[in-house]
Amino acid sequence: MSMAINIMDGASNGNDGVDAKAPAIIHHNVRLAAYDLVTMATIPGAVIALARLNIFEALARATTTPHLSIPELAALALPGKRIDLTYLGRLLRLMAAKKILREVVTVDKNNTVTERRYSLEPLGRLLVDNSKKGSLLHMLYVQQFSEFHQAMDHLHETVLDETIQPFARAHGIPAWEYFKQHPERGVVVNEAMVGFSKLCMPDLLDVYRGFDDVHVLVDVGGGFGASLGLITARHPHISGINFDQPQVIAAAPQLPGVVHVGGNMFESIPSGGDAIFMKAILHSWEDKRCLTILKNCYQALPAHGKVISVEFTVPEILDTEEGDSVALQNDIYMMTWTDAGGRERTERHMRELGLAAGFKEVHVICKLDTLAVLEFRKP
Ligand SMILES: C[S@@+](CC[C@H](N)C(=O)[O-])C[C@H]1O[C@@H](n2cnc3c(N)ncnc32)[C@H](O)[C@@H]1O
């Protein structure tokens, strides 16, 4: 028998109350949280290793067997390959501890585990590559780019000198320029946005009614057009114009109801739309550049037009909701990654930007996780 003392905070107060024969287990929550923090990098590392070994796809395909043993999983994921099942098993167990996979064990009469079987938890389903319902796997790849970690090494320098931009400091050029020069990385970034769009857009389309009265919608910085494709599929009365940089548009797939247009949003934005959609655009840029984009939107829109902007928003006052931490983690990601002062903003900050660009009204229409859907209205 073992006995656990749960210490919520502060230091251990010795082993009072612990059975002398039983091993004392002391959980010091703050210390555990610190261990978790310092070993955190192993989690994305292990997820990426398993994704490269096709493990999540294999588990997603195994619809007839609820839980797969390690040899079954290895055979399904990498048929004909020699695999070290012990190493694979160690990676799988961490996934189970993090509730990415479910582990079901068989034990013998001595309570020794004789077999471990695995299946996907809901969180693991979000890591299946190319899932029709969307995936965050490519987003994880992007966040774990070695280039990103090299940029992180310079984060403190930005605090000491705001003219230093971590990514450019590490790689000599801003991130967007880097992706142009390294298209193999740029494609992963665009795939990440496709997976993210497929994941969040269906829920957004369920709650947001602001597309009902739109006839022509321009998606500014629409990437491969995934969001617009989902919008036009749900609202077939809308004609979509997907606008992005020429090299992104060149690789974009044909989508029903969507025309692709290449250009530069800092110069001009295609007119002809009665609404403009922008998802995860303004957070890449400092206020001055955001104002240029928003003013170009204003110019491109008719008198009754609106901009629909979807952005992560950070809270004005921090509370204990988990989403707060996600939005703030994303903010530091932007601080590391983007040139020209990219950041996640508060709703108030977004409103101020919209009004400064000439829009009459700016409203948060709905929220999805930590994403806010804002409307910037002209009239
Ligand atoms: C973070 S991604 C967002 C993509 C898409 N809106 C989404 O949510 O999936 C930012 C997009 O802005 C585009 N972009 C960057 N600079 C641009 C410019 N000067 N003109 C047009 N698009 C630009 C990038 O190519 C990229 O596709």
Image (cartoon, grey):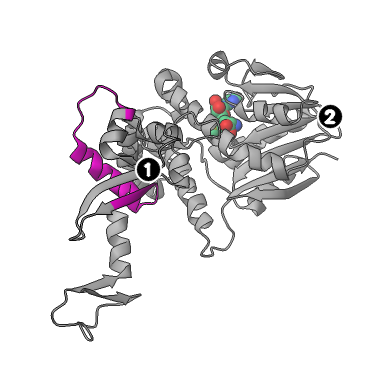
The residue at label 2 has a CB less than 8 Å from ligand 1: no
For disc 2, the marked residue is 302
Can I make out residue 141 in this image?
no
Q: CA distance from mark 2 to mark 1?
A: 56 Å
The quadrant in which residue 254 appears is top right
The quadrant in which residue 109 appears is bottom left
Quadrant including the C terminus: top right
Left or right of 213 on screen, residue 158: left
Camera-side residue of 274 and 232:
232
The quadrant where ligand 1 appears is top right
* Residue occupying the far front of the picture: 109
The structure residue drawn at horizontal position 22% and vertical position 72%, both measured from the top left corner, is 25
For disc 1, the marked residue is 67
- For residue 79: magenta? yes
Q: Which residues are magenta?
A: 76-105
- For residue 97: magenta? yes
Q: Is residue 350 above or below residue 79?
A: below
Q: Give the x, y percent position of residue 289.
A: 60, 35
The structure residue drawn at horizontal position 78% and vertical position 36%, both measured from the top left corner, is 306
Which of disc 1 and disc 2 is earlier in sequence?
1
Q: Is residue 146 above or below residue 240?
A: below
